[in-house]
Image (spheres, helix red, strand yellow):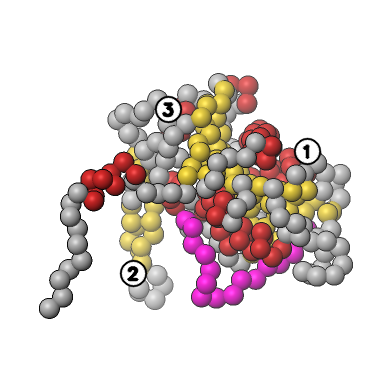
Amino acid sequence: MIVLLTNDDGIHAEGLAALRREFEAAGADTYVIAPDQERSACGHAITTLQPLSVQPMTFPNGSGGETAAGSGLSGGPAVRYWACSGTPADCTKIGIRVLVPSRPDIVVSGINRGPNLGTDVLYSGTVSAAAEAVILGVPGLAISLAAFENLDYSYAAKVAVQVATEIVERPLPENTLLNVNVPAINPRDIAGLTVTKLGIRKWEDIFDKRVDPRGKEYYWLGGGPLEEDHEEPDTDVAALKQNLISVTPVHLDLTNHHILADVRSRGLVPPTLD
């Protein structure tokens, strides 16, 4: 299995390292292309107005030594790990199109620090990297650990290998990726795995107004998720509350097919020009 790994937390993120170690231990032909710095919540942005740079990286191997990354993009030992100046979607795109010598069997994005639930998928660089793979005709998997501190990514990495293997052996329908969220609890306390739909995930937007040293005002966006009064039982949000691993199939077609007839019935026509 040829695997391309990426994320939105950056090339040095612990979640990505855990993912790499687990796939390499499983014998996968593993490549890593990730942003050179954190790019969380960048959505599906791609870089078009400036060039992309990629830097070969070196990571420790399982025996305690170093895995050679090579000295450049051509010649010498094969390069397997890169830091990219662009977004997660850039990493997937340049990885599939240019850097990985053979077409990957799957792109796995993560392990994200914090969950990606409900409408988070519209903002998430993690999910967008997997979506870009699907756009390019390669299966995509996004995986997140549902906490922000005291994190142990080892079990979530095992989940990623298991789900990725299943996707490669039994491909998903066209234009579909899987978005996986793993509870950040003792693996022995996980109640199981369930297939879900996207829930409702709203955030409290708090703009902290500040002043820089030159006296110019600026704003820093903060806030946290808002609790919903009612959550449908078959959603990803509800699954995590029940200590279940959530696996959500996400389709790239955002069309609301249920209301096409309603919109057609409104008789919309182009404006009349004088």
What kind of residue is marked 3?
Answer: Asp
Q: x and y percent of residue 215 in the render?
A: 35, 74
Label 3 crowd (10 A; few <14 / some 14-19 / many >=20): some
Q: Please, what is the three-letter code of the amino acid marked with disc 1?
A: Ala
Residue at image location 62% in from the left, 26% down from the top: 187
User: Amino acid type of disc 2?
Assistant: Glu
Determine which of the numbered discs, if any, sits on residue 130 in the image: none
Q: Are marks 3 and 1 in contact (CB under 8 Å)?
A: no
Secondary structure state at the residue bearing disc 3: loop
Q: Earlier in the sequence, mark 2 or mark 1?
A: 1
Q: Crowdedness of circle 2 by 10 Å Cα count: few (<14), some, many (20+)?
A: few
Residue 17 left/right relative to 268: right
Q: Nearer the viewer, residue 90 or 86?
A: 90
Task: Residue under label 1, please give it.
Answer: 26
Residue 166, x across and y down, in percent: 66, 35
Q: Disc 3 designates what residue? A: 234
Name the front one of labels 2 and 1: 1
What residue do we see at 61% from left, 57% from top? 92
Name the front one of labels 3 and 2: 3
Q: Which residue is mark 2?
A: 217
Between disc 3 and disc 1, whose residue precedes? 1
**Above or below, comparing residue 237 to residue 130 in the picture:** above
What are the residue bounds of the magenta stretch? 43-58
Residue at (77% x, 69% y) in the render? 73
Q: Is residue 250 in sight in this rendering? A: yes
- Of all residues, the one furthest to the bottom in this rendering is 274
What is the spatial separation of the Cα atoms under label 3 and label 1, in whole angstroms? 32 Å
| In this view, 58 is above or below 180 | below
Residues at marks 2 and 1, CA–CA distance in whole angstroms: 51 Å
Dot 1: few (<14), some (14–19), or many (≥20) neighbours within 10 Å? Answer: some
